Each structure stands twice: as structure tokens, then as C-alpha cells.
């Protein structure tokens, strides 16, 4: 199946919660009055704390996503983001005896002769997998023949601070194409719910010079246009 990213749930009124936490740091207001801010005041305060790098207040806001149609190659990259929670479909308990779905890179799809070999390899891997299961090999052992291309699905929760870091790295055009597509869709979804927190979220070149240095894609103008129009 194609990539599908859903925002399952999130902290209610995320902009308001983060602004309340920030207000506590800079105000003598009592706890029960922290939420008493108008949108303009909230926007000013959040812009200030983001510019100062006072990101700890963003940790009070969390977002939970449902993600389908990504490969195991993609999900393996996610574990590098340790300040997050993951629940992934198990290849130990969920058997793919009928046929496992796979993600096919566009670079391979564009080469018919290689696509044929790629699909042939997937068919062969599945045949061996099925034979192992039929022979009584436990699924947790038979899965060793499944490739990185095998599709997976997961539920992932990140707080807003980690999401900003995630978008900074994974929305970059130098990120692997699959995780970039996923991150960009995640950003589109959270901007709808917390526009003040994520107004400038995305790759590093949105906020200044490209942090990739000599490894830059050289397309900062196009990248800025892409994320400005993201909605």
C-alpha cells in the first residue's frame, strides 16, 4: 500500500499548553491563570521562546501518529530518534504466509529489467518463508529471510521538541526519500493543530544557511517554497 500517515491523537490545544508552560517561566501568575492568554499574546510568547531555544516547554505537548506503508528499511531509521515511543507490527506474531507486501523504490520501478529481477527476488524470498513455515519453523525464525523492503506499520509518539529535531533532519532533501516523505506528511498534520509551534519547522535551511555545508542539495530556495506552501 502507499504511505499513509494519520495523526491519531495529541495534547489538547498544544499551542496553548506550551505557551502556558512558557508563561510560568517568565511570570508570577498563579497556575490556574496560566491558560488565560489571547492568541496574539500566545503567538508572541511562543515566537520568543522558540527564538531563544527554550525548547523544554515544548516537551509538555505530545503527538501520536499511525503510520502504514513504510518499509523495514525506513522503520530501522526511526529508532535513532530515541526520545519517542514506538509500537510496531511484529513479524514474530503476525505471519505473512499468504504474501508479504513490499515497498519498491522509484529508482527500481523506473528500470523495467531491474524491477523484474527485484520482484523475482521478493517472490523467491516469500517462497522460502512459506516453506519454512510449512515445515514447522516458528515465524520468529522464518522471518529472517524477509527483506528490508517488507512493509510494516507502527504507532509512534513524539513530543513537540523532538518533532522539531526530527523535522530538521528528516525533511531535508538529503534525507532518505521514504522517511522524508513520512516526515513531511507528519509536519503537514501537526501544523494544522499547532500552527504557532511548527510555523518554521522543517529542514535547517528554512531558518538560515544550509547546515549540510559542502553536502548541500543546493536547492534551498525551492525547499523554502515547498515548506512555505505546505498545508
Image: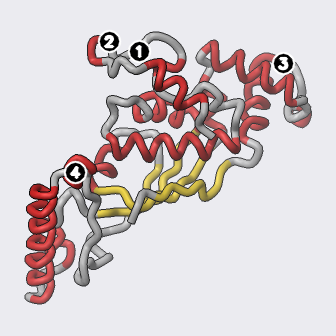
Measure how far apart labels 4 and 2 are at the Cα level. 31 Å
Residue lying at 25% horizontally and 63% vertically, measured from the top left: 150
Q: Which residue is mark 2?
A: 213
Measure how far apart labels 3 and 4 are at the Cα level. 58 Å
Image spot of residue 121 (x, y percent) = 10, 65
For the N terminus, which image quadrant? Answer: bottom left
Q: Compare residues 195 and 31 and report the one nearer the observer.
A: 195
Q: Which residue is mark 1?
A: 210
Q: Quadrant of residue 215?
A: top left
Residue lying at 65% horizontally and 39% vertically, measured from the top left: 191
Helix, strand or loop at mark 3: loop
Q: Are marks 2 and 1 in contact (CB under 8 Å)?
A: yes
Q: Is residue 96 above or below residue 193?
A: below
Q: Is residue 31 above or below residue 96?
A: above
Pair 4/2: label in front:
4
Q: Compare residues 36 and 120 and report the one nearer the observer.
A: 120
Pair 1/4: label in front:
4
Q: Which mark is residue 27?
A: 3
Measure how far apart labels 1 and 3 are at the Cα level. 36 Å
Pair 1/3: label in front:
1
Q: Residues within 10 Å of mark 3 (few under 14, many from 20)?
A: few
Amino acid at each position: 500500500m502507499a504511505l499513509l500517515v494519520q495523526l491519531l491523537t495529541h495534547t489538547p490545544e498544544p499551542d496553548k499548553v506550551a505557551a502556558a508552560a512558557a508563561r510560568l517561566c517568565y511570570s508570577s501568575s498563579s497556575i490556574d491563570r496560566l491558560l488565560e492568554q489571547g492568541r496574539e499574546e500566545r503567538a508572541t510568547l511562543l515566537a520568543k521562546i522558540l527564538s531563544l531555544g527554550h525548547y523544554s516547554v515544548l516537551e509538555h505537548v505530545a503527538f501520536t501518529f499511525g503510520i502504514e506503508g513504510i518499509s523495514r528499511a525506513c522503520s530501522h531509521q526511526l529508532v535513532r530518534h530515541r526520545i519517542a515511543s514506538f509500537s510496531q507490527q511484529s513479524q514474530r506474531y503476525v505471519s505473512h504466509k499468504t504474501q508479504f507486501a513490499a515497498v519498491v523504490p522509484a529508482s527500481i520501478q523506473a528500470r523495467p529489467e531491474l524491477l523484474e529481477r527485484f520482484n523475482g527476488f521478493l517472490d523467491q524470498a516469500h517462497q522460502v518463508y512459506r516453506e519454512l513455515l510449512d515445515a514447522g519453523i516458528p515465524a520468529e525464525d522464518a522471518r529472517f529471510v524477509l527483506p528490508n523492503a517488507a512493509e510494516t506499520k507502527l504507532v509512534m509518539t513524539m513530543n513537540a521538541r523532538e518533532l522539531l529535531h526530527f523535522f530538521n533532519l528528516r525533511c531535508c532533501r538529503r534525507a532518505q526519500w521514504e522517511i522524508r516523505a513520512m516526515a513531511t506528511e507528519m509536519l503537514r498534520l501537526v501544523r494544522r493543530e499547532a500552527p504557532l509551534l511548527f510555523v518554521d519547522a522543517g529542514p535547517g535551511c528554512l531558518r538560515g544557511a544550509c547546515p549540510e555545508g559542502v553536502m548541500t542539495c543546493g536547492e534551498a530556495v525551492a525547499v523554502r517554497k515547498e515548506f512555505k506552501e505546505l498545508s
